[in-house]
Amino acid sequence: MKKRNRLAGMFLTGMLAASMLSGCTNEPAPTATTGAETQKSADTQGEKPTEKASGEQITLRFMWWGGDARNEATLAVIDQYQKLHPEIRIEAEMNSDQGYIDKVSTMLANGTAPDILQQNVDSLPDFISRGDFFVDFKEYPDLFDTSGFDETFIGQFGTFDGKLLALPTGMSCLATVANKTAAEACGVDLSKQITWDSMLEDGTKLHAENPDYYYMNVDTKILCEYVLRPYLRQVTGESFIIDQEKKISFTKEQLVEVLQYIKDCYDNGVFEPAEDSATFKGQIHTNPKWMSGNFAFAYGPSSSINLLTDAVPDSECTVVQMPLGENRVSDGFFADTPQYMTVNKSSENAEEAVKFLDYFYNNAEAQETLKDVRSIPPTSTARTLCAEKELLNPVVIQAVDLAAGLNGKSDKGYTTSAEVYAIQEDMIESVAYGQSTPEEAADNAIDLINDYLSGLK
Amino acid sequence: MKNRNIKTGFTYLCLGIFGIVMLFPVIWLFFACFKSNNEIFGSLKLLPEHWSPEAFIKGWKTTGTYTYAQYFINTFALVVPTTLLTLVSCTLVAYGFARFDFPGNQFLFMILIATLMLPNAVIIIPRYALFNKLGWLDSYMTFFAPAAVGCYPFFVFMLVQFLRGLPRDLDESAYIDGCGPFQCLIQILLPLLKPALFSAGLFQFLWTWNDFFNTNIYINTVAKFPLSLALRVSIDVTSNIQWNQVMAMALVSIIPLILLFFAAQKYFVEGIATTGMKG
Amino acid sequence: MAKEAIKSKARHGGWTKRNKIGFSYVCIWIFGFLVFQMYPFLSSLFYSFTEYDIFHAPQFVGLNNYIRLFTKDKEFWNSLTVTLKYTFITVPGKVILALIIAMILNRELKGINFIRTVYYIPSLLSGSVAVAILWKVLFMNDGFVNSLLAAVHIPPVKWLGKPDMAIATICLLEIWQFGSSMVLFLSALKQVPQSLYEAARIDGASRVRIFFKITLPMITSIAFFNIIMQLITALQSFTSAFVVTNGGPNKATYMLGMKLYTDAFKFFKMGYACATSWILFIVIMIMTLILFATSKKWVYYDN
């Protein structure tokens, strides 16, 4: 009893003081008046645009992420479509790359996902394994024409258990973008094939000779996709996680080896110290050192090479082949799709959404507008059209051509699920910051991954 | 005497300098909105080289379907009803606690105090699951519903304390005159409660306006985004962040709060000033 | 005075018609409490013993989540450490700064009200994304703070890149918003009877002595309230770390609030996140209880 009183007393004093914040006066509260005004606007705007209350207006929600060029082109295609179909209104929900997966997953979980969703290649397999969220485009042969796509390509990218649940948005690959001007300035030879060893060696030399310069512009997330996993794939010939067997494909020693490699690259100035590059994580093209031409190379997906090249307008950029280990079992790298488009199965207007995507992929005007904002177009019609009009960035074409010759296998699946990705990233970060030795980091990560795998049904 | 003047002057100086340091980020924010994107970084200059409203115009329009006008409307549509509902429900509940000695009053009040310490983090996931089942996710019901049923113990508590400070004779005489309990609340107590209500309303307004944790979890559709979410997305929706535009919109989003604060400042300051007399 | 009100209400007035009406008002809250607080609170405990991904029904897994938290999840220990570090820096920092400023502002000077208002402004914006963004820009590698340092020939600091600096930057953001604590102290200081000061002055007590013997004891109950509320908020902190540093670098600002969010809404480990939230709850409870237990020694109640 006494204690209770004490508790109450404590709060009383606090609250009394708190209640005195705004004083004791009988003047009318300004909040009340603003309240009345805005209440009205709240009411009028309460009509949700998604309800087709007025006339036959149909609203589709379309969500994607991307840079300015992609946003502009996609908005332009939406405009074209709305002009052709005045009864359709498409709401653009441009989102950020960071946090996109979290948003999509919560939206799918609670049934508030947009009608049309651009999907991350890494996370889509995970979503598909969790539920029946997306329409099978093969069920709409009259509405969606797949003839422009290469059969094997959509067989490999977009078909899950015989259903075409997602449409690849293009042909893309991981690319090594070279800043020719910077490379020449520090005597980096762009004609030779980079190997993991040569990268470490040349990068060390470059930084030793020119302390302001670094060999490769990366962040810890990029390192997962561009170094850690391909390095291992070249050694083992398998994905990081073998999905059918639900187990890891590498030994601890192999993982330690690649982590040690990454550590060496950091220690020797091949990469900019993690402390400096951390601020630009996810946006390496905004790193002032890249913009001022103090990096010889940068890693980036072919679908957004323009971000990297546009950031250095005064330099000439090109692409070179991805690093290939000398004793590799496979090339590790491969060409795939940059993203997917999916249509929400629970959408009331799924058919309209499919129709829009048909326009998006197959209409000549749309193809011309979209060009290479999602890397090389996936349909042969768009490729021919863009080639005729020379609409594609030659650097992007070159990158995809380089990747087409490589025989690595796509590793999208458990390997790239949000959780496993996070484990890979944390492992690299703790090595990059010198918090763990490669052995400790590898032990910890293998533990966590096995734990994740044992939880799968 | 002279000594004292110097001392006062010194106090003012210190307070002034510290005040400027305190407010500096906000002052800097104001000027940054007029700068070009490059000027924001690597420069010590506070004032922009050219005063350009461009960041405001472009930032307001955004590159997407919705302008900040929409986000403002959304924010008001979210914050105002939440605040009003909170005030109504909390007043009724507080009245019930403060003026009626039904059995269990004390016990229930203790529970209410205990819930003050219940961390939001513990209940957020089941609440999310609950709202999911009710089909309320991605709507402002997720804010309105808890507000309508007095789920803000902080304000109930505050109003109870205030009511207890008002003499009971007031409503008892009204009661004898034939007023029902509800009439008594409306006619007698409500006018006296105004300052406390105002204070509670102000806080609820601020907190809901600034809330990010809950909106981020409950609201998904861009068309329904309040300012906090719109700002968060603006950091990385474009490839090269136009920081001046982001800064401009950040400033715009806090202007209503600052205006409200200065409008209420009189009461705010009076409140502090009169405390001594009251205590 | 308010406490007496509670005491005098030890007996109740039975179920009169009037009281039934009063009870019906309280029922609004009882309903809200049961649906939006009690039910989530208990089901959170239930979920913490299950595997729950929101797509499928929860599956009972016993103590597995808790065992995993304590034995396998190194990130949990890291998050807990980071959260405690943050709490132990920001809560005392904020409270002490607020007290000092309140002491200085607690005097009759022309325009003092305006100054008080100015000091409160940062608090007005507390928790807002706008301020978090502003902080991020100010503390970037080539942001204003480093430019300022450069002007006085101090080499730039990697505020957001270095793990230790990142947490310090976040703490600074929190401490900056000391205004509401300050206002609470100000009103408490106003309530200290002037007669006490006068008596002390007549006795010739020094300023320091007056502070420790009169002022401080008289405001301990407000300080206590302040500390408890700040503690609860600090332990759950989310927005600043999420917007300014996104938990990085190298998880240096990955607080429990963020871990909870990521586990629940990114990895769909709702049950696991609930277990984490219960640990957080227990930590809050323990700290509150410790404060209560020690309060007898240092909190002065005016009765």
Image: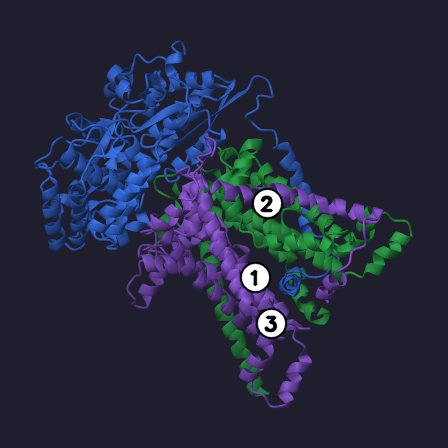
Chain colours: A blue, B green, C purple
Amino acid beneath label 3: Ile
Q: Residue beneath label 2, please?
A: C37
Q: Nearer the viewer, residue A147 or B159?
A: B159
Q: Is B138 located above or below residue B5 in the figure?
A: above
- Are circles 3 and 2 on residues that touch, CB within 8 Å? no
Could you tell me residue C258's position as x and y percent? 42, 48
Instruction: Give the SS element for disc 1.
Output: helix
Q: Earlier in the sequence, mark 3 or mark 2?
A: 2
- How much space separates mark 1 and mark 3, taking CA atoms? 15 Å
Q: Which residue is mark 3?
A: C219
Q: Indicate left or right for A428 with C210 as reference.
A: left
Q: Which residue is mark 1?
A: C180
Tell us which disc is closer to us: 1 or 3: 3
Gap in angstroms between the C-alphas marked 3 and 2: 32 Å
Both marks 2 and 1 on one chain: yes
Please give the name of the residue rendered at 35% of the width and 48% of the height, measured from the top-left corner: C73
- Where residue A117 appears, as percent x and y from the top left, is 41, 27
Front: mark 3 or 2: 2
Asked if residue A339 is positioned above or below residue B74 in the image, the reply reads above
Label 2 or label 1, whichever lies nearer to me, is 2
As drawn, the residue found furthest toward the top would be A142
For the residues beneath circles 1 and 3, the answer to whether they share a chain is yes
Q: Secondary structure at mark 3?
A: helix
Which is nearer the eye, A401 or A78?
Answer: A401
Q: As shown in the figure, which amino acid type bears the numbered disc 2?
A: Gln
At label 1, counting other C-alpha atoms closer than 10 Å, the crowd grade (few under 14, some 14-19, many 20 or more) is many
Q: Amino acid at mark 1?
A: Ser
To which quarter of the image does residue C220 belong? bottom right
Total number of numbered labels? 3
Please identify the quarter of the rendering in which residue A57 is found: top right
